[in-house]
């Protein structure tokens, strides 16, 4: 038995399946949703993530991606700012902003073109480890079924983690929520993304769409976010202008406001027997610094590569077992440093203590003045933590 079954056909699961298929692996997907995704949020991709999607043969003009050429970081109520540019990273763009829906549509088309089976409307009820394979029990159209897999890849955002007793889940509630929206200004963005640290939490503007359009993220307490959602458009724009300042121009229009709670979730292990966990199923991060989705794509890329290497180098059922152990170890550095970096930023910048404002300002100023520091941070954001 050499088949790999991916649970979850979202962007990370679909990308893994395409990478695995292109490297000669026998892969299929199961998805609880019966139809297309209705997700409307934007995604921020690093240049390294673009390379992964390119390797999966899904990067194209149809994604309508907006390039990020520079990242401007500042703090409210304190001095200091930093500006990291694509020249610091030695790349055409530091990152890209695109819609979840456009990426999912391209991935779905690529899955169909590669003849990768996707069972939709399949709800997993249990995983049963059977030595050299896993029995996946699921319901579909009111009937119960069993599917056998040499390897199960959980890429479902964590929906089925509770069915894997060997994997423990740890959560940290930030007592914050993120308000998302699409905002238009009176000033061209010229490829600049903004991250503004405030006592409430970070606020960000990511260029996306037209020359004056951004995807907005405003982090604050859940109660404050509900108040902001209840404001009419004019009052909301005035509130955000006061909160963010005028570095991106005057805010002229807001659309698509929605919110979600913020928690850090990690797992005790990314591998349990013949089951591997990737993407948001393995780690869900705070949106500060935009690390989460990129981390998930690196999970997918590393797992596909290690499984393909094992199949080429070994014969027999032990090949995948060894590859899964290697995957669990290989992802430790990148995941732990990304989680730690994100969690540190939330704690270090989400307060208004004078004792913290000064060192924060000094750190931002030093980053801006030291080319080697900018280059190091740019590489870290582009490609993850080096092994």
Image: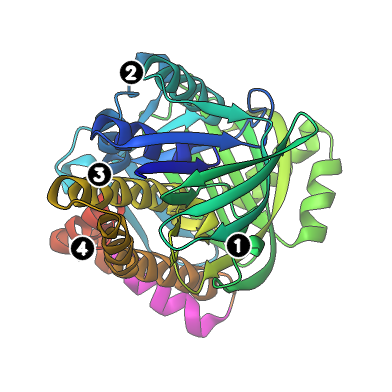
Q: Which residue is mark 2?
A: 60
Contact (CB < 8 A) between labels 4 and 2?
no
Looking at the rendering, in which quadrant would you find the C terminus?
Answer: bottom left
* Foreground pick, 44 / 28: 28
* Foreground pick, 314 / 302: 314
* Foreground pick, 277 / 137: 137
Contact (CB < 8 A) between labels 2 and 1?
no
Q: CA distance from mark 4 to mark 3?
A: 20 Å
Residue 201's mark? 1
SS label for mark 3: strand
Q: CA distance from mark 3 to mark 2?
A: 23 Å
Q: How many marks?
A: 4
Q: Which residue is mark 4?
A: 386
- Residue 172 visible in image: yes
Contact (CB < 8 A) between labels 3 and 1?
no
First in sequence: mark 3 vs mark 1 = 3
Crowd around label 1: few <14 · some 14–19 · many ≥20 (10 Å): many
């Amino acid at each position: 038995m050499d088949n790999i079954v991916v649970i979850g056909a979202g962007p990370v699961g679909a990308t893994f399946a395409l990478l695995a298929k292109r490297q000669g692996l026998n892969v299929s997907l199961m998805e609880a949703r019966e139809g297309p995704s209705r997700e409307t949020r934007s995604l921020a991709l690093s240049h390294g993530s673009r390379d992964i999607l390119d390797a999966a043969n899904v990067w194209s003009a149809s994604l309508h991606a907006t390039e990020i050429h520079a990242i401007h970081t500042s703090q409210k109520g304190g001095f200091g700012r930093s500006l990291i540019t694509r020249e610091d990273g030695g790349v055409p763009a530091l990152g890209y902003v695109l819609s979840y829906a456009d990426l999912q549509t391209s991935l779905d088309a690529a899955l169909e073109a590669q003849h990768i089976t996707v069972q939709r409307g399949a709800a997993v009820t249990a995983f049963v480890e059977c030595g050299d394979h896993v029995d996946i029990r699921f319901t579909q159209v009111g009937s119960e079924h069993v599917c056998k897999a040499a390897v199960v890849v959980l890429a479902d955002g964590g929906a089925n983690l509770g069915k894997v007793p060997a994997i423990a889940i740890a959560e940290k509630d930030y007592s914050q929520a993120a308000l998302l929206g699409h905002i238009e200004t009176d000033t061209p963005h010229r490829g600049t993304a903004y991250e503004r640290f405030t006592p409430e939490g970070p606020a960000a503007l990511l260029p996306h769409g037209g020359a004056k359009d951004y995807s907005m993220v405003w982090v604050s307490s859940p109660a404050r976010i509900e108040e902001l959602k209840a404001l009419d458009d004019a009052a909301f724009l005035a509130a955000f202008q006061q909160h963010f300042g005028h570095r991106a121009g005057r805010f002229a229009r807001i659309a698509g406001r929605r919110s979600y709670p913020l928690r850090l979730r990690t797992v005790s292990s990314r591998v349990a027997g013949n089951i591997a966990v990737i993407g948001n199923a393995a780690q869900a991060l705070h949106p500060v610094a935009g690390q989460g989705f990129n981390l998930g794509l690196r999970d997918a890329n590393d797992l596909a590569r290690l499984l393909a290497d094992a199949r080429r180098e070994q014969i027999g059922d032990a090949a995948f077992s060894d590859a899964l152990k290697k995957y669990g170890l290989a992802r430790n550095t990148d995941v732990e440093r990304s989680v730690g970096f994100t969690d540190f930023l939330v704690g270090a910048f989400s307060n208004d203590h004078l004792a913290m404002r000064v060192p924060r300002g000094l750190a931002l100023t030093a980053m801006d003045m030291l080319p080697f520091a900018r280059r190091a941070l740019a590489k870290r954001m582009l490609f993850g933590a080096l092994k």
